[in-house]
């Protein structure tokens, strides 16, 4: 089903059972896999590839227990040129995927997120709301990127890393703030980053570390709790 108000460019390949809702704009040379749903007002650039069974521009929802309510009006999802999105992914409204971004299969990206040019969000990675991801960042398979986080340019985050933004887990006495990872820092497999810490520029966090405090620039940190070894 393609809504009559949708604008579709030249040389666009659309699979079986694709739904394109009202006021969607699609550029030239775009490929859309079978059973993908593009929600209203989503804007897609040129040379974009979208896999099967993906939902783009999903609106938010919540229940009464959740702290964040979807009340406000969110901007549309914007997908710039040369972006590739895998199969079975869900990307919400008010996300911008800048030029050349790669999003793997089974990935979920919540609202109010920007992913900078040429960055990678790996398979089965989850990016929560209100998080800024810089340019040329690598987020590997299975990462959990919490809300309210800042990831600067050229950061590398290894598989299955996890981060948190609420130190006291819903008791309501902590301002939600995710970690800040400064430019060029590298985080090993399965590391856990606690809320509101800063990982300095070009610092290295070893696999499996639990980081409870700020890490200065250019240091190597390993263990639980993380200690500087170099
Ligand atoms: C942190 C890291 C870069 C350190 O490498 P390195 O500088 O060559 O350090 P070494 O291997 O010489 O180890 C130095 C010491 O730290 C310990 N160590 C190294 N990595 C550790 C880790 N992740 N957790 C706990 N201790 C660690 C070593 O056992 C060694 O201890 P010792 O001095 O008692 O023998 C590396 O060990 C690491 O964890 N890399 C992450 C790999 C990864 O997750 N990649 C993701 C993409 S696949």
Image (cartoon, grey):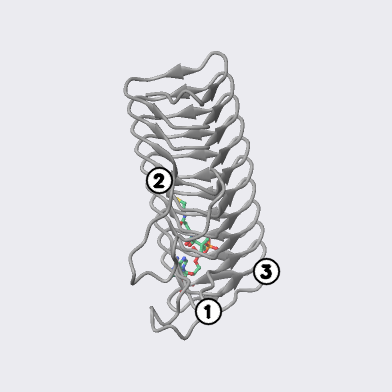
Q: Position of residue 52 (x, y in %)?
A: 35, 29
Question: Which residue lies under the disc numbered 2?
Answer: 107
As measured in the structure, the alpha-carbon distance from the residue carrying label 2 to the one carrying label 3 is 30 Å
For the residues bearing labels 1 and 3, Cβ distance under 8 angstroms: no
Mark with earlier residue (1, 3): 1
In depth, the one of 216 and 49 nearer the eye is: 49
Q: Mark 1 packing: few (<14 Cα in 10 Å), some, or many (20+)?
A: few
In depth, the one of 125 and 111 nearer the eye is: 111
As measured in the structure, the alpha-carbon distance from the residue carrying label 1 to the one carrying label 3 is 25 Å
Question: Which residue lies under the disc numbered 1?
Answer: 175
Mark with earlier residue (2, 3): 2
Residue shown at 41%/66% (left/top)? 208
Q: In the picture shown, does residue 194 fall above or below 147?
A: below
Residue 178 visible in image:
yes
Q: Mark 2 packing: few (<14 Cα in 10 Å), some, or many (20+)?
A: many
Residue shown at 33%/65% (left/top)? 63
Of labels 1 and 3, the one closer to you: 1
Label 1, secondary structure: give it. loop
Disc on res. 122: none
Q: Position of residue 228 (x, y in %)?
A: 57, 76
Question: Which residue lies under the disc numbered 3?
Answer: 217
Mark with earlier residue (1, 2): 2
Q: Position of residue 13 (x, y in %)?
A: 46, 17
Of labels 2 and 3, the one closer to you: 2
Q: Quadrant of the C terminus?
A: bottom right
Q: Quadrant of the N terminus?
A: top left
């Amino acid at each position: 089903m393609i809504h009559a108000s949708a604008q579709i460019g030249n040389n666009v390949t659309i699979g079986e059972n694709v739904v394109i809702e009202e006021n969607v704009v699609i550029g030239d040379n775009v490929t859309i896999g079978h059973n993908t749903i593009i929600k209203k007002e989503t804007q897609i650039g040129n040379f974009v590839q979208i896999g099967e069974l993906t939902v783009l521009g999903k609106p938010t929802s919540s229940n009464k227990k959740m702290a964040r309510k979807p009340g406000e009006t969110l901007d549309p999802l914007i997908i710039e040129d040369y972006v590739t999105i895998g199969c079975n992914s869900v990307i919400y409204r008010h996300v911008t995927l800048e030029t050349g971004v790669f999003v793997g299969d089974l990935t979920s990206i919540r609202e109010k997120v920007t992913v900078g040019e040429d960055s990678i969000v790996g398979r089965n990675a989850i990016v929560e709301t209100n998080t800024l991801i810089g340019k040329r960042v690598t987020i590997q398979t299975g990462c959990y990127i919490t809300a309210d986080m800042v990831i600067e340019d050229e950061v590398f985050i290894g598989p299955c890393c996890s981060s948190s933004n609420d130190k006291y887990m819903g008791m309501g006495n902590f301002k939600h703030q995710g970690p800040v990872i400064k430019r060029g820092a590298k985080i090993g497999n399965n590391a856990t980053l606690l809320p509101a810490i800063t990982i300095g520029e070009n610092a290295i966090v070893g696999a499996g570390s639990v980081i409870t405090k700020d890490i200065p620039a250019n240091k190597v940190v390993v263990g639980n709790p993380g200690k500087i070894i170099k």
